[in-house]
Amino acid sequence: MSNYHETFEGCTIEIKDDTYLTINDKEIDYEHTLENQKWSSRYLPYTQYDSLIDLAQAIVRDTSEFKPVISH
Amino acid sequence: MAIRKDANTLSTAERAEFVAAVHELKRTGIYDQFVLRHANANMRAIHRSPAFLPWHRRYIWDFEQELQRVSGNPNLGLPYWNWPEGGANASMWDDDLLGGNGDVGTQIVNRGPFRASQWTIVSSSGAPAGPLTRNFGSQGWAQTLPTLDEIEQVLALTPYDVSPWNEFVNTGFRNQLEGFDGPNLHNRGHGWVAGSMLPMTSPNDPIFFMHHCMVDKLWHEWQLRFPNQGYLPVSGAAFGQNLTDPMAATNATPIGPRPLDVLDSSALNIQYDQLLAGTLPPPSTQPDIIALTIGSPVDASISIPGEEDLYSFEVPAFGSYTIETTGPSDTFMTLFGPDNPNQQIAANDDGGQGLNSRISQTLAAGTYLVHIRLYSPNSTGNYTIGVESNAVDTTIPDINVDGPAINAAISVGRESDLYHFRIDNQGTYTVETEGSTDTFLTLLGPDDQTAEIAMDDDSGMFLNSRIRAQLTPGEYFARVRHYSDFGTGPYSVSVHSG
């Protein structure tokens, strides 16, 4: 078991014990499918990811819940 | 009837009408309600499961109804994104419809009607979340759009879905159309646009509705190709996924909330401009219309699953009428008119004896059309249909010219109230409504309940109607309905000289 921590596009991604994912301290539910070793989340319904880190980065990058609002 | 067209083929006027309607929905907050309905639904209740297709069919149908309402055009059809012809250079991405790709680097859409200064997306909590973003072909798993060959490959698959009814099944139509198996059709469209089309808030991008219109068209074509392959499962899957379960985040009105309620596209008045070469048009597109005589029931049958029988009848004068079926079949009835085969007045499932349908309605003079189908699209059966004139007081309320207004109400959706008034001296007269209801007024006559003189929506105060016309002596009729098919509310109506 290991822990992971990074700041990605301004958000703090933490994974404790290879399992517990938080983004900016918010716990993120996800699904890990053993059959194909894919990770997915209710935030991103249209694809699956090859690792929990890939999923976490995609949530930060592609959902409006975590990325800072761009003014226009 | 609204016809759903390839977005690339829309005329300049059709593009402008669609864009204006979408902006009106955005301005009034209704568009964002659609975003939140999708964003806050349980992800697995509407994706990666059998209800994926019926849920989105109902969702975009509801959106289309709203487009028609705000545009005032019941024939406005939701355009579809024809993927093989819908790449970055397609005309649907021009600045008069969707605008194009986002800017390099920021991904922000800065062209077209949904550019940054004109359109703000919302998060799943409804908070403003900045401009629309797109990044065509940027996702490694979605660098190209589905081809016609890939579409045909998926359209050949049966059955509809298989256990365990999720994204891991490697056979069946639904999962390959959705995109977790096979060539990946639907998911790839989201991924190809990228940006705002990637998360559960993807309806923030209006292309979402054209994308799902294409998905729905392909399901429709699959249903036409395999009329004996029904929706699965009937039972045994998670609640909300079975044929007669209510689906998540789906209203029970104006049509039912179950997959069963949306299986028949024709019953929802869904029609596409063209079908693929391998799809035969539905057998009931050009049915015979059987003329009914009031008081003379006729025996009939639905002999092919999914068949719909059409009947017409003439109402000679304003009055109360009952149209109903009898017999052993579970019928579903829809009534259209007067003198307009596309204007739905009422629909009924089990208002008659047993599982029969019945519509009792006050009707103005004119020609009416009745659609009869069986509730289950997989069933056949016999029934008898008849129209009766009800023995009730059918006196048309009189409005006294220059007298007090009559207080009334539209108490059910699509109600149409008829009034009579007499003009003795030629002159200018004003017919108008007052109150808080968005009324629509039609003036008819002289001496004829069906001859239209004028129509008006909002010329009165606020959302009221007002018609000012030169009238010769004679009998006149004023018909009042709500502007929206589903609207109700109180109003008063009066006629005065001048």
Image (cartoon, rainbow, N blue to C red):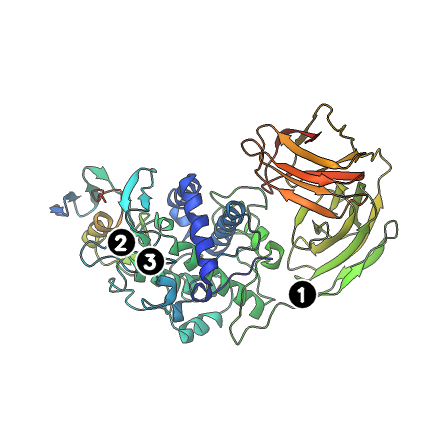
Q: Quadrant of the C terminus of chain B?
A: top right
The picture places residue B407, in percent across and down from the top left corner, at 69, 26
Residue sitting at x 76%, y 47%: B450
What chain is tagged by disc 2? B
Residue sitting at x 70%, y 65%: B304
Residue B490 visible to an observer of this rendering: yes
What chain is tagged by disc 3? B
The picture places residue B168, in percent across and down from the top left corner, at 38, 60
Q: Nearer the viewer, residue B384 or B121?
A: B121
Q: Residue furthest top?
A: B404
B233 left or right, relative to B300: left
Residue sitting at x 61%, y 36%: B465
> Helix, strand or loop at disc 2?
loop
Could you classify mark 2 by the number of other residues whose Cα lies within 10 Å: few (under 14), some (14-19), or many (20 or more)?
A: many
Q: Identify residue type, mark 3.
A: Gly
Which residue in the structure is indicated by mark 3? B99
**Is mark 2 in CB contact (under 8 Å) with mark 3?**
yes
Q: Identify residue type, mark 2.
A: Asn
Residue B416 visible to an observer of this rendering: no
Please say if A13 is above or below B134: above
| Residue A49 image-quadrant placement | bottom left
What chain is tagged by disc 1? B
B407 left or right, relative to B7: right
Which residue in the structure is indicated by mark 2? B110
Q: Nearer the viewer, residue A55 or B462?
A: B462
- C-alpha separation, residue under disc 1 versus residue under disc 2: 45 Å
